[in-house]
Amino acid sequence: MPTQWLPLFPLNVVLFPHMALPLHVFEPRYRQMIADCLEEGHSFGVVAIREGSQIGLATPYEVGTLAKIVRIDRLDDGRMNLLVMGASRFTIVQTADDRPYLRGQIRIIPEAGDDLDATARLTETTAVTFRQYSNLLRELVGQQPDDAEPPMEPELLSYLIAAALNLQVSEKQSLLAEPRTDARLVLELRILRKEIVLLKQMVAHAATAAKAKTSLN
């Protein structure tokens, strides 16, 4: 695969393909980065921080996601609010600090293991489990179940679940870096099943507590 140079935006979040991410850009170096992207007609890459912080020096993970700018809201003082959408994943070959912001020579990572026929049963099982997980979360906060069906396209479903799960940045990064869609779905199915057990316990506990409170009243 060919390589290209791309501005990099290190953050304490993981951007997944097909997922939206709002960004507040206030540091001068990243305001310059966005200006350069718009002038030169290219995008930038979002990379999760392995070491360091968003303000100051940061060492990113090797795998990131291209960020397509969907909307820009400019503020009077030069700051801006962005809405970006995750596109392709990439791996960083090398970095350069020849500009105020970090740049990386990147190589796009092709998706693999997302054959519909080969992963149809896995996709269906994971989608059903994800819906159960999502509705248990809603029940826990007193919301009605959501009747919307999860997407049945394996790659899209895998990234939707990865973005929705309440995981540490390092755990989300592992899901992003997983080369194969089917392997990512297997990992997510395992996580969802564990979370469902805990959520059922929490829902039952909340119901018992509510019943006890009603009895006291």
Image (spheres, rainbow, N blue to C red):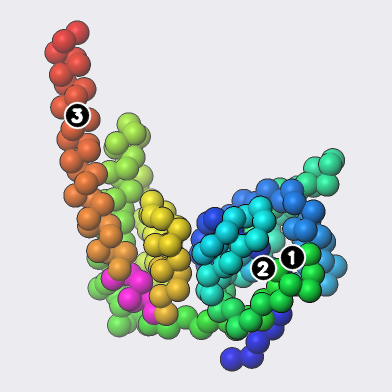
Q: Compared to 64, does 115 lie above or below?
A: below
Q: Nearer the viewer, residue 138 or 120?
A: 138
Distance Cα–Cα, label 1 vs label 2: 7 Å
- To which residue does mark 3 refer? 207
Position of 76 with respect to 49 (left or right) is right
Q: Based on the displayed image, in which of its 4 quarters is residue 20 positioned?
A: bottom right
Q: Amino acid at mark 2?
A: Leu
Please name the residue shown 51% across and 83% down the image. Answer: 110
In the rendered view of the protein, which quadrant contains the C terminus?
top left
The kind of secondary structure the magenta stretch mainly shows is: helix
Please name the residue shown 67% across and 68% down the image. Answer: 8
Picture coordinates of residue 16 (x, y %)? 51, 64
- To which residue does mark 1 refer? 101
- SS state under label 3: helix
Q: Earlier in the sequence, mark 1 or mark 2?
A: 2
- To which residue does mark 2 refer? 8
User: Does 6 appear in magenta?
Assistant: no
Please name the residue shown 21% across and 22% down the image. Answer: 210
* Mark 1 neighbour density, 10 Å: few (under 14) some (14–19) many (20 or more): some
Give the residues in magenta.
180-186
Q: Name the mark nearer the viewer: 1 or 2.
A: 1
Q: Amino acid at mark 1?
A: Tyr
